[in-house]
Image: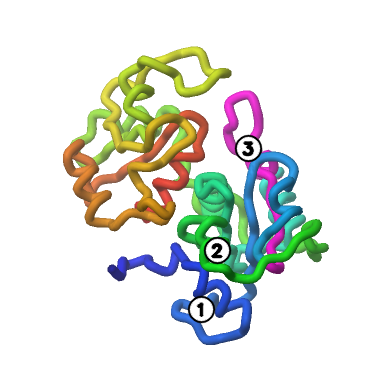
Amino acid sequence: QKLPHFEQLVYPQWLHDLQQGKEVTAKPAGDWKVIEAAWGAPKLYLISHIPGADYIDTNEVESEPLWNKVSDEQLKAMLAKHGIRHDTTVILYGRDVYAAARVAQIMLYAGVKDVRLLDGGWQTWSDAGLPVERGTPPKVKAEPDFGVKIPAQPQLMLDMEQARGLLHRQDASLVSIRSWPEFIGTTSGYSYIKPKGEIAGARWGHAGSDSTHMEDFHNPDGTMRSADDITAMWKAWNIKPEQQVSFYCGTGWRASETFMYAR
C-alpha cells in the first residue's frame, strides 16, 4: 500500500541499503543521520545499536513536571549538538517507537524538513538479522547554524486555547490517543498524574491496553497497521481525513506516534 507520504516510514532493509551506498527509493536529498531515541542514559544502546547511529535522550526535548517540550532556545542547542540542520534528513528509531516519534514530531516543529521513522523500531532491525554495533555514541561535529528560525512549523503544536477552539467545529477533531480506561476516567494512566477523566468533547482515537502500549496501531510485529484499518477505526468516532485534527495523550509520546502515522 503506497501512501502519499510513504517515505516517512522506512523499513530495515531500506536503511541498510542506504548505509551501504546502494540506490533506494525516496533517497534523502542531502546529508542524513540515523539516531536512536530513548528516555535516560543509553543503556541498551551501549549493548547493541544500528551501526553509526547517534543517541538522543528524550530529556533533551522535553522536561518535567508535565513533560512539555523544552524551550525553542534549548531545541536549537540540542539540534546544534547533534549536527542537525533544517535540511538534514533524520532517520529515527527506538526500542519503543513512540520515543522516536516524540523526538521526530518536535524536530518537525523546529523545522527539520525530512524526518523519518524506522517502522517497528529497533525490534524490526534486530529481527531482520542486520548488522549491529556496540559502544558509546559517535563524536558528532556540532552544527551551530540550523538554517531557519525555530520554530519553522509552529502550527504542528497547539496551545490550550487553540486546542479548545477545535472542540465545537464540525471540520475539526481534538483526538485522545489514550487507552479506553483512561478515556472513560477509571485511571489517569500514570502514577505521577492524579486527575482522571477526559477533555469534554474530545474524540477517542484509540491507543492500546494501557499508557505504555499502542496495540491498536500496530501489527503483531510492531509495525504500523494498514492505513485502511486506522481510517476505519477513526471513522467510527467521526475522525476524518478532511478535518483539522490534533492529537494528545498523557505526556505526548503516543500522540506523537499517531501524528507520524497520520501525516
Measuring from the top left, give residue 51's x and y in whole percent.
69, 68
Q: Does 63 appear in magenta?
A: yes
Q: Which residue is mark 3?
A: 62
Of 191 and 77, the residue lying toward us? 191
**Which badge, 3 or 2, comes first in the chain's sequence?**
3
**Which badge, 3 or 1, comes first in the chain's sequence?**
1
The segment highlighted magenta reads 51-73
Residue 80, label in figure: none
**Which badge, 2 or 1, comes first in the chain's sequence?**
1
Measuring from the top left, give residue 167's x and y in whole percent.
28, 29
Of 206 and 75, the residue lying toward us? 206
**Residue at x 52%, y 67% (from the top left corner):** 128
Label 2 SS: helix
Quadrant location of the N terminus in the rendered image = bottom left
Q: Which residue is mark 2?
A: 125
Disc 3 residue type (three-letter): Glu
93 over 162 or under it: above or below: below
Q: Circle 1: is it few (<14), some (14-19), or many (20+) Cα within 10 Å?
A: some
**Residue at x 38%, y 36% (from the top left corner):** 208
Q: Are marks 3 and 1 in contact (CB under 8 Å)?
A: no
Of 3 and 223, the residue lying toward us? 223
| Distance from Cα at disc 3 to Cα at disc 1 | 30 Å
Measuring from the top left, give residue 49's x and y in whole percent.
67, 60
**Residue at x 47%, y 29% (from the top left corner):** 250
Q: In front of the other: label 2 or label 1?
A: 2
Q: Circle 3: is it few (<14), some (14-19), or many (20+) Cα within 10 Å?
A: many
Q: Are marks 2 and 1 in contact (CB under 8 Å)?
A: no
Residue 27, label in figure: 1
